Every structure is written in C-alpha cells, then in structure tokens.
Image (spheres, rainbow, N blue to C red):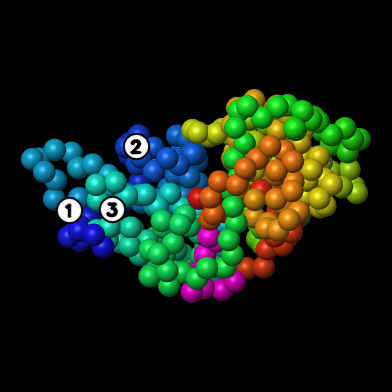
Amino acid sequence: MTGKPAQVIIRSMRPADLPVADELRAAAGWNQTPADWMRLLQYEPEGCFAAFPAEADGGEEPRISGTVTTTCYGTELAWIGMMLVHPDLRGRGIASQLMKHALAHLNGRGIRCIMLDATPAGEPVYRRLEFEHEWTFFRWHRSGEATREQSARVQGSAGQPANHAFSSLSAACRDLDRKAFGTDRSLWLKRLLQDSLDTLVIDDGKNTGFGMVRPGRNAACLGPVVASSPEVADRIIRTLLQNVDGPVFWDIPQTGAEAEWRATALGFEKLRPLSRMRWRSEKIRPDIALQYAIADPATG
C-alpha cells in the first residue's frame, strides 16, 4: 500500500451508479462502453459492487471509490471483472476489500471455479488474495490505417453473410462453445449477440464456428471467436474484419508462432500481456485450441 488504508462501504451497484463508474473506466483507459456496464449489471444485479467512502466530506453525495463485477455461468464458473479504483485512492486497500466482497458473494452462491484476467498492474493484488497464474495471453491492436486488403473476405460456401442479426446460436455452435469455454455460457452469448456490430455463424454440418465484432470506447472488439478448425476461424475473422474501418482490439488466448503469424498478417501488433488467474477453487477444462478470440477480459 502507498497510503493510509481507506475505509469504505460496499453495496450492490445500481443503474444510477454507472455514469460515475464509467469515469473510473475512462481514467484507467479501458475499452468497455456504457452498454457493457449495463449488460453486466442486468445479468448479475446482485453480483456487481461499488465501494463508497465510509465518511463523506462536507455532507456531499459520496462518490464511488471503486467497482468490481462478477459474471456467473451457472454454478460451475464465475468471472471477476471491472476491478477499478479511483486514481487518487489506489494503494489504500480498496481493491482488496472489493475483491474479498466479490469472493464472499461467489462462495455464497456455491461457485466451483472463480477466474479473472489480470492486467500487469492488477496481478500483484490478486496474488496476495491467493489467485494463481495459469497462463499468459496478449491483446493485439490494429490501427484504423490498416488496409481492407489485409482483411480481404475469404469466399466459401459454408457460412452466412456478416451483419446478419442473429438472435441465438445453432445447437452445434453452442456445443462447440461449451467445449471451448469449459462450461455453458449460451445465455451470456445471447446478450452479446444483441449488442454485436457484426456477427458471422458457420454451421454446415462439417464446419462450425461463430464470431462477433462489438463496439468499444477506444477500438472495436473482435471476439469471441470460436471455431472447429483454424481454416474456419480464419474465414470468420477475415470476414468480420473486412467491415471494420477503425481501430480493433483482439485478445488472442492462444500463444505461439501460429497465433502471432495470423495476427501480424492481418495488420495487428502486440499491445500488452494479460494473466489468466484462478482462485483456490476447482479447475474447469476448456479447450483453448478452439478459442481464437476471447469475449472480454472482464467476462472470460
């Protein structure tokens, strides 16, 4: 810690809190939008939390000191995200208090596995709370100056045109995602589909996969992308990127030469690492080889 420990009151987040919560997000430079905040809150209205000063100055309405969200996929898995603290209050134990509150909430719900994706700045906080590092992945970035030729459409008979307003995924895609992610997140994916800028689904009985491009504050988000083979993934990724003129973030869970070659060939540059971490809980068994882009570090 770098200052006197701060005493805070933690309660469930409310819609009226979101504008100030988003100011914390902006101060951190993160990419989530107001729609992302609202989706998190609507999905887990009792599982998103805000911290406030225990004593307000001058009788003014207390300002949010920090936030944390939880996203549950049944009772098998939960993700902790949006762990934010006001810049003037960092290093005073607020993050630890919020995390302990979130962990108590998830333990009370009987969640078997608790995960998060940590920035380099946040990882030491989580290690002190007994989170263990599992593996590292990278965020990649493509500027708005990348040419359309770098993401030219790959033609093929399998697949439906991008921009189709899918309300749900096929049974084959849901089964593939369950294997890739390690548990059923179909209800969460349905909500993401509603807010997607662009969606592509491939399901022809032989090839299966889906991908989305979603809006972001600083750049569009490519993800999630789940596919039965690298060829299907490439078709999805190139098709979706063809319709994006501005900057794009792509969080690639796979590491190694093949992932780096794919991203570099499409005009992306490696931006920063993220650490996937698990609390002292059971493991799930995702098939990372089927994941080509995660949805969001806040939700897995």
**Is residue 47 depicted above or below 106 in this figure?**
above
Alpha-carbon neighbours of circle 3 within 10 Å: few (<14), some, or many (≥20)? some
What whole-number distance in Å separates the C-alpha atoms at marks 3 and 1? 16 Å
Q: Which residues are magenta?
A: 275-283
Q: Is residue 153 left or right of residue 22?
A: right
Tell me the tag on residue 90.
Answer: 3
Whichever of labels 2 and 3 marks the residue nearer the N terminus, that label is 2
Q: Is 75 part of what is drawn in magenta?
A: no
Q: Which residue is mark 2?
A: 23
Which amino acid is tagged 2? Glu
Whichever of labels 3 and 1 marks the residue nearer the N terminus, that label is 1
- Residue at x 32%, y 50% (from the top left corner): 85
Give SS at disc 2: helix
Tell which tag, 2 or 1, sits nearer the viewer: 2
Q: Quadrant of residue 182?
A: bottom right
Q: Quadrant of the N terminus?
A: bottom left
The percent coordinates of residue 234 (x first, y second) are 79, 43
Tell me the tag on residue 216.
Answer: none
- Residue at x 35%, y 46% (from the top left corner): 13
What whole-number distance in Å separates the C-alpha atoms at marks 2 and 3? 15 Å
Q: Determine if residue 165 is in view.
A: no
**Is residue 162 depicted above or below 190 in this figure?**
above
Q: Is residue 92 left or right of residue 71?
A: left
Give SS at disc 3: loop
Q: Which residue is mark 1?
A: 54
Q: Determine if residue 62 is in view.
A: yes
Tell which tag, 2 or 3, sits nearer the viewer: 3
What whole-number distance in Å separates the C-alpha atoms at marks 2 and 1? 20 Å
Whichever of labels 2 and 1 marks the residue nearer the N terminus, that label is 2
- Residue at x 90%, y 47% (from the top left corner): 205
Whether the residues at callouts 3 and 1 have beta carbons within 8 Å, the answer is: no
